[in-house]
Image (cartoon, rainbow, N blue to C red):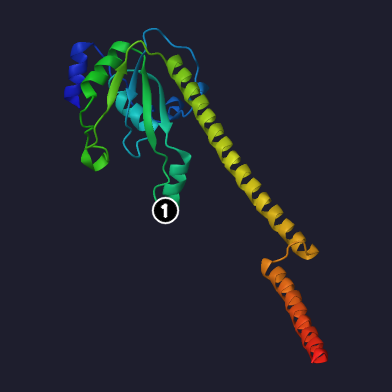
Amino acid sequence: MNEIIKDINSNKSLKLTDLQGDIGNNLGASINPQSISLTTSDNTGVIYISRIPPGMQPHHIREYMSQFGEIDRIFMYPEDKSIYEKRVKMGGSRQMRYIDGWIEFKDKQIAKSVAISLNNTNIGGKKRHNRWRDDIWCLRYLPKFKWHNLIEHYRYKKVVRKVKLQARLNQVQKENNFYIEQVDKAKRKEKLQKMNKCEGNSIDSSDIKYIYTGEIKDISENNEKISKVSLSHLL
């Protein structure tokens, strides 16, 4: 850790800030970037954290990064609510996890130096008090990127998510309507068949054959009797 700080100090004279009382700062625990003031200095620099170690909270990030320079704002994107609820239901940790995040340094040169020096390095620290000792920092300095860009990005993602959700709901509604329509058709068809059966409109072909066969049989028997009587008179 001291070597990294020396390396950053050699690139830019940095004054390490006092960590006392910084953990409880509300800015470090902010979830919604829109709730923070839009005022941004031209000299600020933003670092993007592409992976947040499991269990690491905003105040942990602030405590660690404040060693290198003065930090203004931190925003960490939380995991999906459904994933959190599923984990808790299965008996997992109730602590909120974060996917990625952004750190705003008041000096962009410090932000750039920190990102270059710490990227792909172990978080380190005393093993007894640091569960992320063997985790790796995944940092990238964002040149010409300011906090208002993050808010715009956040709003854009929110709109995209809303549009996708609406499209999904529309598709589900369409499928439900199609299913209900098919059920109604089946019910109407069944009702029509029952009505026809009650009115006798439906006659089986075997019944028709039986009726005509009976009539033909009776006629042939009568003709035979008549012919026998006529022959007896003639003889």
Q: Report x, y in % for residue 179.
A: 60, 47
Q: The N terminus appears in which quarter of the rendering?
A: top left
Give residue 169's quadrant in the image.
Answer: top right
Res 26 seen here: yes
The vertical placement of 208 against 170, above or below, is below
Q: Residue at 65% across / 46% down in the picture?
A: 181
Residue 80 relative to residue 170: left or right: left
Q: How many marks?
A: 1
Observer-nearest of 34 and 73: 34
Indicate whether 61 appears above or below 234.
Answer: above
Front residue of 2/162: it is 162
Looking at the image, is 60 positioned above or below residue 16?
below
The image quadrant where one finds the C terminus is bottom right
Point out the residue furthest to the top here. 42
- Which x, y percent locates residue 143? 32, 12
- Asked if 110 appears above or below 59 in the picture, the reply is above
| Residue at point 56%, 32% (across, down) | 166
Q: Is residue 20 visible?
A: no
> Residue 140 sits in which quadrant?
top left
Residue beneath the point at 47% across and 46% down: 85
Residue behind mark 1: 90
* Quarter where residue 114 is shown: top left
Q: Position of residue 55 (x, y in %)?
A: 35, 39
Q: Is residue 60 left or right of residue 117?
A: right
Q: Secondary structure at mark 1?
A: loop
User: Residue 205, image x and y in percent?
Assistant: 68, 66
Q: Amino acid at mark 1?
A: Met
| Crowd class of label 1 (few under 14; some 14 to 19; many from 20; radius 10 Å) | few
Q: For this rendering, which residue is in front, 7 or 223? A: 223
